[in-house]
Image (cartoon, grey):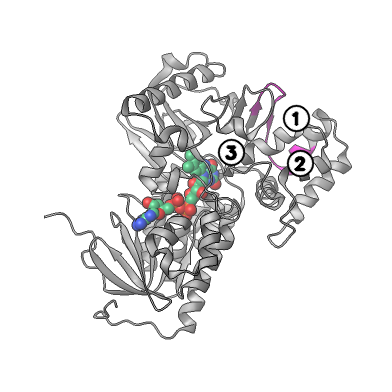
Amino acid sequence: MPKDFLQGARDHYDCVVIGSGLAGLTAANTLARSGQSVLLLEQHYKLGGMATWFKRPGGHIFDISLHGFPFGMVKSCRRYWTREIADSIVQLKNIRFDNPMFSLTTTFNRDDFTRLLVEQFAIPAATVRAFFDTARGMNFFDDQSTTVGQLFERFFPGRQDVIRLLMEPITYANGSTLEDPAISYGIVFSNFMSKGVFTFEGGTDRLIKLMHAELLRSGVDVRIKCDVEKILVREGRVTGVRVNGREISARSVVSNSNVKTTIFHLVGKEHFDRTFCQDAEAVRLNNSSCQVYMALKPGEELDEGLGDLLFSSTAPLFRTDLLLSRNVTSRTFSFYYPRTRPGSNRSLIVSSTNARYQDWADLSAEEYEASKQDLVETTLDALAKYVPDIRAKLDHAEASTPLTFRHYTKHMEGASFGTKFEGLAVSRAIPQQIGGLYHAGSVGIIMSGWLGAMNYGVIVANDVDSWLMKTGSPQTSPTATVL
Ligand SMILES: Cc1cc2nc3c(=O)[nH]c(=O)nc-3n(C[C@H](O)[C@H](O)[C@H](O)COP(=O)(O)OP(=O)(O)OC[C@H]3O[C@@H](n4cnc5c(N)ncnc54)[C@H](O)[C@@H]3O)c2cc1C
């Protein structure tokens, strides 16, 4: 008999949350804390979505998306999670850039960037100040027609080197391009510039373990290996979900699945009006990623002078299409020293590159394996510039591709950061189409990344809470049925 992962689950909840990415986890926790009954359903065998890790023989633990997030995480974790989680957030002090235009190390905050722009790039201090103030002053309701490229041209005309310094990390952080609205850049850049780049001490496994414990304390019914097949809708209102062959009713549903998957696969376009479907169809997915995970032999050390994050590139100019190309010229190396997981003697390196799903999707099994191996070897070659004896120190290396991300999270085309900017308006408009149905998860650059996803979970949880209050007292009957 296959295991019943829904054993003991009730037939009805105030809210079902589909997916345990950081938005889904935070929405579930916030709703349960405000007294709603919540069922959290995750199709994978572990919680976290893209905020994940994996283990390999020899005691190696690789983090997938723990490269850096803004200081705002401390406040969000303290408010919506626990003090222990918030107190485990620590700064990464050495962020490095190495490319044909410049090599430098920075703490990646406003003071240090101002120093660099004035002293090393010879930009007048008043221009730097005006740029930072403009970026900081942007909000979601601003003019959305100005592009990132135009914003840079206004302050730093013709300065490709400055654009590279300001843009390259943000492109890695959320896939944004020079053609995206300036607002998306301004908000994310300013978030980082407030205090620098931060990480979670103890690794993603510890974070998700602490979150899981808190969800249980808050009263969330947490279920893994529960793949939601359908969101049930009747007469313009959500009524529940079908999962693992069972129907569970709910007064509200929050989908943390990709917004396009939610609309077109989990619900079905017949439940939405035509204009909404056209808008949703037009939403562009964000790019995906390739990574190479490298573990050093136990006890082997990395020189901390390598920094925590290294944006390395051999491309003469910064161009978004070059960042996505199969012919990789740019890599972000994350160096994980033993202090990442205090008490361990392990040093690991993860190399990340933005990538296109289409470049990997149609390869034969042999070509796919050969391409992955090639990615590992070329990455080791590139890394040898910084860690000359890397091959001698290496214990384990392997690669992931856009297909890997799609496999584990079910994101269309393995999108690392959900959708482009226009996805946010579509995500926000879902409840006007179907009463009680919400989406929370990576959309539109601002609402992606660890901080964006988590905060979006809170915003949506508050919307759901209002909906539940407005639409009457919770049904608690354990015998409530669907449809
Ligand atoms: C390689 C890489 C590096 C990154 N680096 C950083 C970084 O350094 N800093 C940063 O801030 N962000 C980073 N990110 C982005 C960040 O990890 C994500 O934006 C964020 O974690 C996404 O959270 P989310 O809530 O949108 O959900 P996701 O993480 O996308 O999770 C969605 C969840 O829904 C589940 N699901 C989907 N469909 C169903 C279904 N039908 N039934 C049940 N469950 C379902 C999936 O299994 C998954 O668990 C990185 C991402 C990648 C891929």
How far is mark 3 from mark 1, CA to CA? 17 Å
Q: Is mark 1 within 8 Å of ligand 1?
A: no
Q: Secondary structure at mark 2?
A: helix
Amino acid at circle 1? Asp
Q: Label 1 belongs to which residue? A: 161
Q: Nearer the viewer, mark 1 or mark 2?
A: 1
Please report the residue visible at 41 percent of the width from the left and 24 percent of the height from the top: 371
Q: Position of residue 222 (x, y in %)?
A: 33, 61
Q: Quadrant of the N terminus?
A: bottom left
Residue 172 is marked as 3
| Residue 342 sits above or below residue 7 on the image | above
Q: Position of residue 472 (x, y in %)?
A: 43, 86
Give residue 261's quadrant in the image: bottom left
237 left or right, relative to 79: left
Q: Position of residue 98 (x, y in %)?
A: 65, 24
- The magenta stretch spans residue 17: no
Residue 88 seen in this snapshot? no
Residue closer to the observer: 425 or 462: 425
